[in-house]
Amino acid sequence: MNDFTIRASQLTLRRNGAKVLDNVTLDIPAGAVVGLVGRNGAGKSTLLRCLAGLAAPDSGNASLLGCPSLQLTDTVRERIGYVAQTPDLFEWMTVEKHLFTIGRAYPRWTEERCLALAARLNLPLNVRVTALSGGDQQKLSVVLALAHDPDVLLFDEPVASLDPMTRREFMRAIFSGERATERTVIISSHILSDLERVVTHVAFIRDGQLQLVDDWDAMLECYRLIPQAVANGPVPPDAVVHYTRSGQRLIDTRRAPALAQTGRSLSLDELFVELNS
Ligand SMILES: Nc1ncnc2c1ncn2[C@@H]1O[C@H](COP(=O)(O)OP(=O)(O)OP(=O)(O)O)[C@@H](O)[C@H]1O
């Protein structure tokens, strides 16, 4: 037994001979909301698919709620919500039929919660799925993932096609429901301004490797971008998180308190740019 709700341990996965995931280890405690960020092709979807048990790594293992991802029991599946980057929907059904058909398979699902979520996201109910816009299809998969009040949410770019108002409602919806405060969430998104409002932690992935994982408040408070030469003396090597191509350094001032006021702090958007330069 362990206290981590979502775990990846030394995951490596190859496609066409190239490492898409390279020795990824990530432990997410109950109640954490983790933003998974990285450039296109960095490996975010692949990592989420391994966690959901939809892709088998070449080595290493993943687990959700203590259960190996490749052998999820029905009891554990019922506690998970997953939104894939490309939703796999029953196109011939109406939205309402789709919601009810899937939802009723989950013991915790309620019609009331499901309809409230659909209304909140402005999702039309009496339309065939095939006639939905891309954004409305995405809303449908979000409602499908949330309506059974899951304990674990795995979201792969769930808001890419949503307008700003619906994105806001979506972010609120993640944190509504009886178990919302205990819910453990991992969400990949390129809309970093949305993420930084809701995450407790951020995991940066680059070329299949986890580059940096930390508490988001600590990143905001303690990470600073400093120039090559600083007046306050030498920079302890273990405080340097990243050397940028322009010769600057991203440092963690928890390991260099004397530099706490040196340079400048960064938004999530800026951190992303610096860590990928
Ligand atoms: N089935 C596959 N066959 C070959 N290569 C694959 C396959 N699936 C993923 N890849 C490669 O693995 C890498 C990671 O893909 P992945 O979809 O996980 O990235 P991502 O970070 O989610 O990207 P994006 O932000 O564009 O969605 C990419 O280089 C992609 O081309």
Image (cartoon, rainbow, N blue to C red):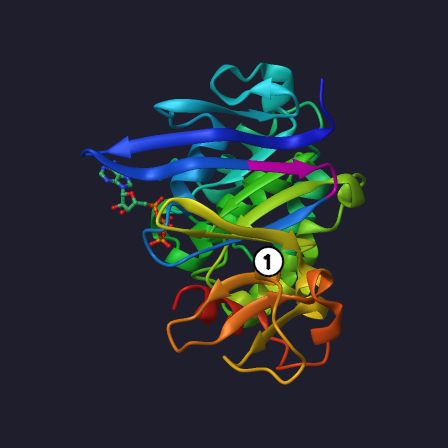
Between 3 and 164, which is closer to the camera in this rendering?
A: 3
Specify few, some or many for label 1: CA neighbours under 10 Å numbering under 14, 14-19, or 20 or more.
many
User: Is 167 rendered above or below residue 146?
Assistant: below
Range covered by the magenta-colored residues: 26-31
Task: Please state the horizontal and vertical placement of residue 179, each as a whole percent of the image.
Answer: 79, 39
At horizontal 37% and vertical 72% (from top left) the residue drawn is: 245
Q: Residue furthest bottom?
A: 231
Q: Residue furthest left?
A: 16
Viewed as shown, does residue 150 lie left or right of 21? right
At horizontal 55% and vertical 69% (from top left) the residue drawn is: 250
- On the rendered image, what quadrant is the N terminus found in? top right
Check if residue 122 falls in the magenta segment.
no
Q: Main secondary structure of the magenta part?
A: strand
Between 229 and 97, which is closer to the camera in this rendering?
A: 229
Between 15 and 218, which is closer to the camera in this rendering?
A: 218
- Mark 1 belongs to which amino acid? Leu
Disc 1 target residue: 121
